[in-house]
Structures are given as structure tokens and as C-alpha cells.
Image (tube, rainbow, N blue to C red):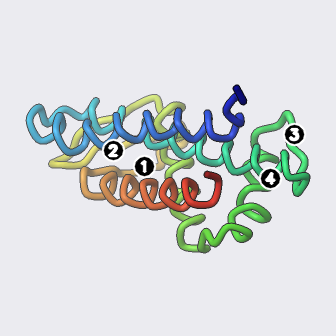
Amino acid sequence: MESEPIYLKSLKEGLKELRIADHMLYITQPILRDKRILLSSIDKIYEAIKKLITAFLQYDYLNKKIQIHSDSRINFETFMIKTAPRYGISNQETEKIREIVDLAESHKKSPLEFTRREKVVIMSGDLSTKQINPDKLKDYLFLTKNLFRKAQIILA
């Protein structure tokens, strides 16, 4: 019996994160209206994106198209510059991926987060702010789902 390729394992793990984010945004958040759910949702979308990128990079590495580095930032740039265009991931999509990564990293480093109306404001150490709301997160979720559909076709 042949074992599953590592990139398919990464893809499956990412899909789990995606399902959790979907449930949080469409089921839990409308009922509870808690800012922590929005913040957890961006984390889950970010984790799904990381697993998706990992799957593509592992696939390309196994097919000897790229090198994988120990520095995740180099791997991220490799994905953005070489891998994404190879698989028809548009510049618009890669920009949204960057937004998701920036937002999730801002959230992790943030000394202060607060709610204003339906939005969660994430403040950074230099007092700059980023805002998230359910609609923006649903947009990110929709993008991530489409990227996973592409990946399942390409990598399967």
C-alpha cells in the first residue's frame, strides 16, 4: 500500500482549518457576535493559507522545480514569485494572500484589539490600525476556498 504524498497531507490539514473558519464565520459569529470569533477566524484562514502554500511548495519541490529553505519568508516569496504564477494564481489572488498573512501577523503581534461597531480594530506597536469585519473575512474565506479548489485539481 502506497503512502499518501506529503503535499496531499498538507492540503487535507488546510481543508480542516478552512472548514473550522467557515463554521465560525457563518454559524457561530452571527449567533454570538463576539470579536474573539472574528480574530480566531482570521487565524484559521491564515493557517489554511499556510498549509495551501506548503502543499504547493512541497509539490514543486518533489517535482524538482524549486528549492525549499529553512526560512519561511524565503519560501513565501518563492511561492508568490514562482509557484503561484505557474498554477494560474492571479496577482489579485496573491495580493489578497499577502493581506491575509499581514493581518494575521498583525493580530499575533498586536498589543491592543478592540471592537468598534461591527468591526474589530487591531492596533500595532506603532499605533497604526487594521480593521476586520465579517464581510471582509467572508471575502478572504471565499478566496481561500477557491484556491483550495484549484489546488485539489492541480495536486490530486
Mark 3 nearby-residue class (10 Å; few <14, some 14–19, many ≥20): few
Residue type pointed to by label 3: His
Precedes in sequence: disc 3 or disc 1: 3
Mark 1 nearby-residue class (10 Å; few <14, some 14–19, many ≥20): some
Q: Which mark is residue 121?
A: 2
Q: Which mark is residue 129?
A: 1
Precedes in sequence: disc 4 or disc 1: 4
- Residue 37, given in percent of the width and then of the height, sits at 27, 33
Q: Which mark is residue 60?
A: 4
Q: CA distance from mark 3 to mark 2?
A: 34 Å
Identify which residue is drawn at 82% across, 37% down.
71
Task: Point out the residue furthest to the left here.
Answer: 31
Q: CA distance from mark 4 to mark 3?
A: 13 Å
Q: Nearer the viewer, mark 4 or mark 3?
A: 4
Q: CA distance from mark 4 to mark 1?
A: 36 Å
User: Which of the 4 image quarters holds residue 146?
Assistant: bottom left
Q: Are marks 1 and 2 in contact (CB under 8 Å)?
A: yes
Precedes in sequence: disc 4 or disc 3: 4
Q: Are marks 4 and 1 in contact (CB under 8 Å)?
A: no
Q: Are marks 4 and 2 in contact (CB under 8 Å)?
A: no
Precedes in sequence: disc 3 or disc 2: 3
Question: What kind of element bears circle 1?
Answer: strand
Q: CA distance from mark 1 to mark 2?
A: 6 Å
Q: Nearer the viewer, mark 4 or mark 1?
A: 4
Residue type pointed to by label 1: Thr
Residue 42 against residue 13 in the figure, above or below = below
Question: Dot 3 corresponds to which residue?
Answer: 69
